[in-house]
Amino acid sequence: MTTQKKLSRRAFLGTTTKLAAATLAFPTIISARAFGANDRITMGFIGTGDQGRGDTGALLEFSEVQGLAVCDVVDDHLEKGRNLVNNHYGNQDCKAYKDWREVVARPDLDAIYIGTPDHWHAIISVAAMKNGKDVYCEKPETLTIQEGKEMLKVARRYGRVFSGGSQRVWGDYNWFHKMIYGGRIGQVQEVWVNIGDPSGPCNLEPEPIPPGVDWNMWLGPAPMRPFHHTLINRDWRPFRDYSGGGMTDWGCHVFGGALFACNLHKTGPVEVIPPDGKEVKNLTYVFANGVRIYHNGGWGGQLTFKGTEGEIGQYGDRKNQKEIPPNIQIPNYKGNSGIFGDFLHCVRTREKPFRDIEIAHRTATVAHLGNIAYGLNRPLKWDPIKEEIIGDPEANLLLDRAKREPWSV
């Protein structure tokens, strides 16, 4: 614990406006926090559809969490979210909102959970952090590479804790990490990542907007288009305006596992080569140390690793996950109980969580670069330090995209 004089977080933030558009005039780096009643971490939950409610329920199981607010643009989701929180505590204290800006502006909240569709993640995260909130954001944390760069910049400038939601990187793939860090296959040379494809255009037929749905707010920064019921029921991932498709959805898990196993999770590739139907069979990422990561292929399920002294995967005739991994310690979650416990621990200690925004952004960048290479159907040279595509102005324009007014990051 630092010996610096403690500063009341709520007193400091009392001067913020009621809209997320208002920002603090200078960075706030608070080394010791003043929490709410009973020393709890007070939280607001934005996005209470199926995934959001599941995560909200899991976070409420932590005794140090006090849920105070829920937000959703669909009345049915909102009411279910509020009931979930109120039933947990046996009271009616949870306030419901349809405008997330009112939630992030509340001075009595310490942290925000974001479970919205992907196209909202960056805007809400940045506004929350500028309003002094720590953030847990579901994966994929970004819709574009530029969004991730801005989220990282804001998190560092305002001294915020940000955890991405790729729980499978450690939870599902720690066997690989232990085997590889323990030297089981020698120096890694190649990795195969089996996930879905990029997203595409949304061509759903128009439907009438039902009562209780704020469709304009659901779209937010995305282009205006007619309502369709599947978009408010978790079926928006195939469409580019809202998601990067399977490449970013499971990609944040599986690319994340591959990058962490290879100790490449804080950098990026130097080249991305799309398949040409001849020599290049799969989309290929080339890293400065010579490691190649392929989109799809391999023999081992979601992940296959080949090294100088062997190969390992998950399934098939060569299944070898029955091997006991080396008994080595690899830095992963802090605190207790997985990725949520890691986030809550870091909210208190001000440490960086396992899926810190820098690492989450780097992983999402790999997936986004793959989508760009597929879309342009040509190789890309990537500078992982400057985070720009070399010698290709057209491709660089795809690092971000226009947002519908008045929304911006």
Image (cartoon, rainbow, N blue to C red):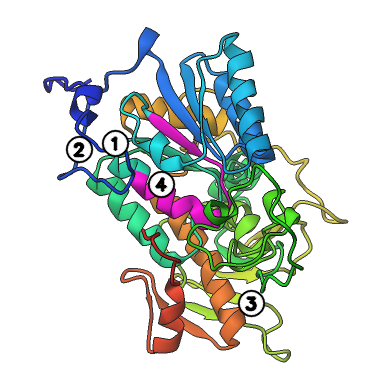
- How many other residues sit within 10 Å of disc 3, few (<14), some (14-19) or many (≥20)? many
Q: Which residues are magenta?
A: 111-127
User: What amino acid is at disc 3?
Assistant: Leu
Q: Is residue 248 magenta?
A: no
**Picture coordinates of residue 183 (x, y %)?**
57, 50
Residue at the (31%, 37%) spot, across then down: 18
Q: Circle 4 sits on which residue?
A: 125
**Picture coordinates of residue 193 (x, y %)?**
67, 62
Q: Earlier in the sequence, mark 3 or mark 4?
A: 4
Q: Is residue 72 above or below residue 336?
A: below
User: What amino acid is at disc 4?
Assistant: Ser
Q: Circle 2 sits on which residue?
A: 28
Circle 1 SS class: loop
Taking depth in this image into account, of 26 and 63 the one nearest to the observer is 26
Q: CA distance from mark 1 to mark 3?
A: 40 Å
Q: Earlier in the sequence, mark 4 or mark 1?
A: 4
Circle 2 SS class: loop
Nearest to viewer (mark 3 / mark 2): 2
Residue at the (40%, 31%) spot, across then down: 111
Q: Circle 1 sits on which residue?
A: 132
Q: Earlier in the sequence, mark 1 or mark 2?
A: 2
Nearest to viewer (mark 3 / mark 4): 4
Residue at the (45%, 72%) spot, across then down: 401
**Picture coordinates of residue 24 (x, y %)?**
20, 42
Asked if marks 1 and 2 touch (Cβ < 8 Å), the reply is: yes
Taking depth in this image into account, of 192 and 289 the one nearest to the observer is 192
